[in-house]
Amino acid sequence: MIKVFIVDDSALVRQVLSTCLGNHPGIEVIGLAADPLYAIDKMRRDWPDVLILDIEMPRMDGLTFLRQIMSERPTPTIICSTLTEQGNSVAVEALAAGAVGVFTKARLGLKQSLEQLASELIRKVEEGARSRPRVLPSAPRVAPPSPAVAPISLLRTTERIVALGCSTGGTQALEFVLRQLPRDCPGIVIVQHMPEKFTADFARRLNSLCQIEVREARHLDRVHDGLALLAPGGLHMQLKRSGAHYQVEVLDGPPVNRHKPAVDVLFRSVARQAGPNSLGIIMTGMGDDGARGLLAMRENGAHTVAQDEASCVIFGMPREAIRMGAAQQIEPLSHVPKLIQQFASSPRPT
C-alpha cells in the first residue's frame, strides 16, 4: 500500500482528493491537514510514502514546508495548487525544491475537475512512490572568465554537441550540472519532460543561476559554445547540421514514448547529425524514453553516459539505456560536469 498524506487548507479539496485516492486498492490516505504545522505533528507519528501539498496555506506556505521536508527527510511530494494554473514559475520553484510532480486544480468546478483528473492524480502518486528524492550538494559556482578574454562562443561555433535527456528529478539534476559549466563549454541541447509553458520559466531560472546562457529553444536557433537550449514543452526538438554549424529544429508532432518533447527524438537526430562529435547523457527519469536514442548515438560513434542508480530520483530511463547496452559509462551525477568539460578538451575525431 502507498501511504499518502494530504495538506490543503480547503476542506473540500481534502475530501475530494481523499475520496479519489481512497477508492484505489493500492493507496491508503493516512492523514489530512489544513496547514503544514498541523501536518508535521501527524506525519511524525506515521510518515507517508507520498505527500500531496498545496502552496497557499495559513501559517506556512507550501514551498517553505517543501524545502523544510526535503532538507530534513526527503519525501516524494506532489504539488496540487491553483497557482500552477497561471504561475508556472511557482511550479518550477517547487520542482527545483524537490517536488516530483505538479497537479493543477481548477479554480471553478473544483469538485468535478478533481474527480475527472483522478486517474492522472493516481498515476502521479504511483510514480512518486517509486521515486527517491534527495538533497543534492550545492553546486560550486564557476568563476567568470577574465574581462580581457572574449568568451570562446564569440570566436567560433562549436563542433562538439552535448545532448542531455531527463525527466522526474531532472530539474534539480540539470541545475546541479549546468551551474558548474564554464562559458566556453560545448553547446548543449536538452530535453526535460515538462508541460507546455513551464519550460520557458525553467530556462529563465537556470539562466539566472549559470555562467552559460540557458534559454528555451526557438526554431532554427544556432547551437554554439556557452549556450544550452531547452526543448519547449509540447514540442519536439531535433538537431540539424547547417554547413559548418549546428542548429535546432523545433517541431510539432505526435508524442513519442508518450512524451512531447521526447528524448528519443533529440538523441536520434544527434546520432544522425553529429555522430562522433557528440556526447549523450541520459539522466534521472521514469520510463524508457531516450534509451533507444542513446543506443543510436553510441552506434554512430558518440560517447554515451548513463546516470547511476544511487544518484537518480528515478532510475527508469538510465536503467533501460544500460540494459540495452547504450551507455559506455555509468556515472554519478557529481561526475557529469567534469565529463562534459573533459569531452570539450578531448581530441577531435578525424
Image (tube, rainbow, N blue to C red):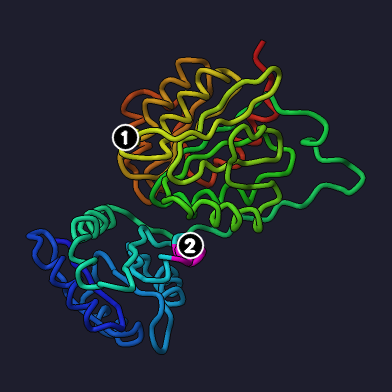
Classified by dominant secondary structure, the portion drawn in magenta counts as helix
Mark 2 vs mark 1: which is more N-terminal? Answer: 2
Pair 2/1: label in front: 2
Circle 2/circle 1 CB separation < 8 Å? no
**Residue under label 1:** 257
Side of 288 relative to 17 (left or right)? right
Q: Amino acid at mark 2?
A: Asn
Query: Which quadrant is home to the N terminus?
Result: bottom left
**Residue under label 2:** 88
Between 342 and 79, the residue placed more toward the observer is 79
Between 237 and 279, the residue placed more toward the observer is 237
Residue 34 falls in image quadrant: bottom left
Residue 189 spot, x, y in % from top left: 56, 36
Q: Amino acid at mark 1?
A: Asn
Residue 25 spot, x, y in % from top left: 7, 60
Residue 350 spot, x, y in % from top left: 67, 10
Give the residue drawn at x 61%, y 29%. Answer: 161
Residue 92 spot, x, y in % from top left: 48, 60
Residue 325 visible to the viewer: yes
Element at badge 1? loop
Picture layout, residue 111 above or below residue 127: below
Give the residue drawn at x 26%, y 53%. Answer: 127
Give the residue drawn at x 30%, y 73%. Answer: 108
| Residue 235 drawn in magenta | no
Residue 339 visible to the viewer: no
The magenta stretch spans which residues? 86-94
